[in-house]
Image: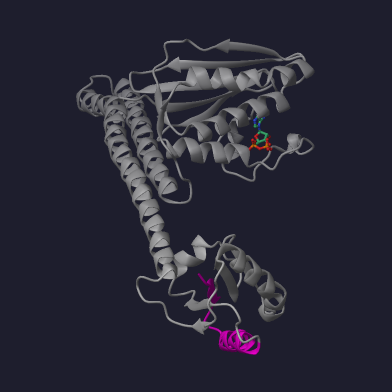
Amino acid sequence: MSIQLLLFVDERPSSHEHIQEIQQYFKQVKADSPYQLQVIEIQEQPHLVEHFRLVATPALVKVSPEPRQTLAGSNIVNQLKKWWPRWQLSLQQTSPKPGNNGQTQTAPSSHPINSLGHSAELMRLSDEIFRLNREKEELVQQLKFKDQVLAMLAHDLRSPLTAASIAVETLELAQNHQNPQRRATLKEQLYQQARRQFRIMNRLITDILQASQTMNAELVVHYHDILLQVLCEEIIEQYTDLFAEKSLTLVKDIPQDIPPVYADEELIRQVIVNLLDNAIKYTPEGGKVTVSVLHRTTQKVQISVCDTGPGIPEEKRERIFEGHFRLKRDQAKDGYGLGLSLCRKIIRAHYGQIWVDSVLNQGSCFQFTLPVCR
Ligand code: ADP
């Protein structure tokens, strides 16, 4: 039985001095109990640093006899002076006949310190396997989801594409119209129609591209099948008091047969909470807030948070989602103008859309869509 010590050092030149100081100390006290000291370069064994949760070097860890103890910092020898006699005592208590041949050594492979290293390595590897399995699972889900998004995009593009091609075909027929004035008006209308449909297609494609960029950037999304009716009810429940405080009426239109959506529950919670917070913040006392969920197409579910507040001027309906933007009239209310931009980022990362419909002085309706699970 011996006192087993690990001395963790880094690459700094002072580390060498620390090793020498400690060895010197053992010489001075003539190491009257058997001990084993192993010097570990932290950059070579980072998993051991993690295993012993070390936050500073040099660090001297007593691994045996139990309990484990760590001395760290530049005054290890001073600390050692205090602890060494106690460690000796606890060694005598755990082993009745201690030997007397202290030594500093490099451990052979059967050495207990090495087996400690192996078990730390094993732990690290099993953590790694667990992490890789989880990542693989997520990647498989994401690939499936990308397929679904492609299908959605193809589906969404079909109607503007059809409308645009009908407009172009009709243009050909319009060329032959007898009445020149009628011909000119018809042509103008059809060009307009075609341009409008191309803009819609452009928007759809840009949204998808931006969403994939956001997803690849910092937002980490953990997709699961989630039931919006349950999530909405859960959130609304927590708002009862806030509604009462401002004498606001809450109307819910949440059918129970809404299919599950493929989304990150916590992120979607953030979106709904943000929209509800805004509705309460900007709607005057006595107003009404309506939360509704609608199964809009076979592919999408639409969630709306509508209020009877001041509304948003048309020219600002896009800007409020851009971040750091607040309407002048609302500067006095608290907030940083970040909530809606985060909502947009989250919804885009889900390949959904978010927008506001509004009538000035009558209210706003913030709406977003999410893809249905297949
Ligand atoms: P914040 O509310 O913290 O200022 P947001 O990003 O959530 O930031 O909103 C941006 C701006 O949009 C707000 O400052 C406000 O001018 C306007 N806004 C948001 N929600 C509503 C609402 N429900 N009714 C009227 N204006 C709103």
The residue drawn where x is 42% and y is 21% is: 301
Magenta region includes residue 9: yes
Drawn side of residue 237 relative to residue 9, left or right: right
Pick the front one: 363 or 142: 142
Determine the residue positioned at 61% across, 70% down. 56
Residue 146 screen position, x and y as percent = 30, 38
Q: Quadrant of residue 143?
A: top left
In front: 250, or 263? Answer: 263
Q: Nearer the viewer, residue 135 or 26?
A: 26
Query: Which of the two residues, 199 or 133, is positioned nearer the viewer here?
Result: 133
Q: Is residue 321 visible?
A: no
Identify the magenta region: 1-28
Q: Is residue 49 visible?
A: yes
Position of residue 58 relative to residue 30, above or below, is above
Q: Quadrant of the C terminus?
A: top left
Tell me the quadrant of ligand 1.
top right
